[in-house]
Amino acid sequence: MKKLLFTLFTASVITLSANAQISKGDVMIGANISDINFALDKPNAFSFALNPKAAWFIQDGLALGGDVSFGVETAGKGLGTTINYGIGALGRYYGAKGANELANHTRFFGEATVGVSGRNLSGGGSTNGLGFSFGPGFTYFITRNVGLETLLKYEGVVGFGSSAYAHNLNLGVGFQIYLPGRATAKKVEKDFN
C-alpha cells in the first residue's frame, strides 16, 4: 500500500509540474537560509543566515540581479555575537534540462556574487570590504513557478579590519519563485488562443 501511495504521489507531482520559467524576460525572486544551528550543549548559542535575492533573465537560463545577506552567530552567554552582512550583484546560469520526465523538473545551476560584505565580532574583530561568492546549486521545480533548491557556495571577504581576509563554505536551502515576463506571457496566451 505504501508503494502504491508513493507511486501515485510521484506521478501526480510529475504530471502537475511543467517546464520552469527561466526564459528571457522572466523574473526570479526568493531566498535561501543557511547555517541554522542550535547548540544543545551551550545555552543561548545559535546561528542563522538569510539571503534574499532577485534576478531578471537577460537570456534563456542566464539571470542577473542582486542579493542581500544577513547572518547572526552567538556563542552563548557572555561570549559575544558575530554579525555577517552583504549586498551585491548576482549572476546565475542554469544548465540544460534533463532527458526524461523527472529530470525535466530539475536543473543544475551556477551562482556567483560580488559586492560589499563584512564579518563583525562583538569582541572587536572584523573584516569589511569586497565580498564575493561562487558555487553550484540544484533546483527541483515543484510547479512551473516555484523551485526548491540547495546551494553550496564558497564565500570570501577581502578588505580591511583586524583581518584582511575571511572566508567560509556555506550550504543553504531555499525556494525561488519564477514570474513570467511579457514574452513568456504572450507565448502562453498564444498557445491558448
Image (spheres, rainbow, N blue to C red):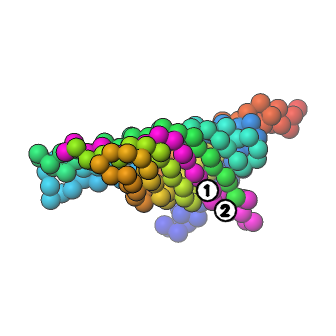
Q: Which of marks 2 and 1 is nearer the N terminus?
A: 2
Graded by Cα atoms within 10 Å as few (under 14), some (14 to 19) or many (20 or more), the crowding at tag 2 reads some
Question: To which quarter of the image does residue 51 belong?
Answer: top left
Location of residue 62 with respect to 188 vertically, above or below: below
> Is residue 188 at all visible to an observer of this figure?
yes
Residue 185: horizontal and vertical position, in percent? 77, 33
Q: Give the range drawn in magenta.
A: 96-123
Q: Nearer the viewer, residue 162 or 14?
A: 162
As measured in the structure, the alpha-carbon distance from the residue carrying label 2 to the one carrying label 1 is 21 Å
- The residue positioned 43% from the left and 43% from the top of the image is 129
Residue found 14% across the figure and 55% down from its top: 42
**Residues at badges 2 and 1 in contact (C-beta under 8 Å)?**
no
Counting from the top left corner in percent of width and height, residue 2 is at 48, 67
Nearest the camera: 151 or 166?
166
- Few, some or many residues within 10 Å of mark 1 (<14, 14–19, 20+): some
**SS at mark 2 in the image:** loop
Q: Does the magenta stretch include residue 118?
A: yes
The mark found on residue 110 in the picture is 1
Q: What residue type is labelled 1?
A: Gly
Say which residue label 2 marks. Answer: 102
Query: In this image, 144 relative to 153: left or right?
Result: right
Q: From the image, state whether disc 2 or disc 1 is nearer to you.
A: 1
Q: In this view, does 18 lie above or below 154?
A: above
Q: Does the magenta stretch include residue 45?
A: no
In the current view of this chain or complex, which residue is farthest to the left? 78
Tell me the quarter of the image containing the C terminus. Answer: top right
Res. 71 image quadrant: top left
What residue type is disc 2 on? Leu
- The spot of residue 45 in percent (x, y) is 20, 50
